[in-house]
Structure formats: C-alpha cells, structure tokens
Image (spheres, grey):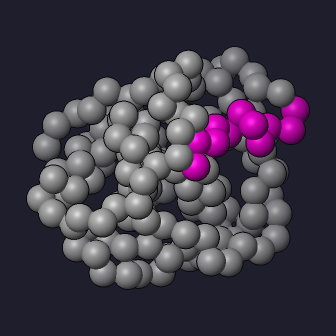
Amino acid sequence: MALRNIVKVGDPILNKKSRVVEKFDEKLAVLIDDMLETLYKENGVGLAAVQVGILKRVVVIDVGEGPMELVNPEITLSEGEQKEQEGCLSLPGKWGTTVRPMKVQVKAQDRNGNWQVFTGDGLKARAFCHELDHLDGILFTSRVINGVVEG
C-alpha cells in the first residue's frame, strides 16, 4: 500500500465525471488499498478516486464502522433531510452547511465485481452523497446553503 496525493480545489480534474470501472483486477485492488491508507492518514470519512487523480467510479468510506469499498456506486433510495456541516479533503480548512438526505441506500460493486447494498443514515448518508457527488464532478461547495466558512 502507498499514500496517494490528494488533489486540491482548483485542479480541473475535480470537475470531471468519472468513468465506470469495467476491469476488476489487481490494479483496482491496489487503488482501493491506497485510497483507504490515504483516507486514514488524513483522518477523513470518505475519499473518491478522482480526489487522488484517478477518473474511476471508486469510493472508500469509513465513518467509524469499518471500511466500505464502493465501485460503480449508485444511490437507489433516499429519504428525509438533514442540515449539517461538511468539509472535504480536497478543500482543507473549509466547511459549510449542506442539505442532504437523512437516509440513503447505495448499490455498488466490490473490488471483485460482486454487487452489494449499503444503507446509512446521518453521517454515513452524508458521506455516501458527498463522495458520489465527487464521481460526477460536483464539490460540496455547490450544495452549501449558508456560504463556505474557513475553519
């Protein structure tokens, strides 16, 4: 495993749409392992491949319940609403209040191509939405309701 550099705001790759993963191989497994190591080193809760400069639909999340690896994720259900503060490893020191669903269900593949379903509420739902937005080139700052705050 290796640490990856996190792409920061201003890099145009963050505004690009990521490509569907079609090859489930050792290269993908290494990417996922590296992303998890990077996530933990940076004390984050989620990281999308685009944030390490790779335009693939891959996300890792850990909200304190153990790591989740999501390849080609899709939100299949969302319910309710929450207004909470969000930050992003690609925008260090910046925070803002966003409106996200309270509960989210996500269908995704694992590193071997097997489909699985994840359900989360609260922070986990926010993390799912935040990271899946990254895959479509959307930063949380476009969802902030009261302006971005320096932290």
Magenta segment's dominant SS is loop
Q: Quadrant of the N terminus?
A: top left
Q: Which residues are magenta?
A: 136-146
At x 36%, y 35%, the residue is: 52
Q: Is residue 51 visible?
A: yes
Q: Is residue 65 above or below residue 106?
A: above
- Which of 110 and 125 lies nearest the eye of the viewer? 110
Q: Is residue 69 above or below residue 88?
A: below
Q: Is residue 95 above or below residue 105?
A: above
Q: Is residue 12 left or right of residue 112?
A: right
- Which of 20 and 59 lies nearest the eye of the viewer? 20
Q: Is residue 62 visible?
A: no
How many labels sit on residues?
0
Residue furthest right in the image:
146
Q: Quadrant of the C terminus?
A: top right
Q: Is residue 38 left or right of residue 63?
A: left
Per the image, is 143 magenta? Answer: yes
Per the image, is 7 magenta? Answer: no
At x 86%, y 38%, the residue is: 145
Q: Is residue 151 left or right of residue 28?
A: right
Residue 107 at x, y percent in the picture: 50, 76
At x 75%, y 56%, the residue is: 100
- Which of 107 and 33 lies nearest the eye of the viewer? 107
Q: Quadrant of residue 116?
A: bottom left
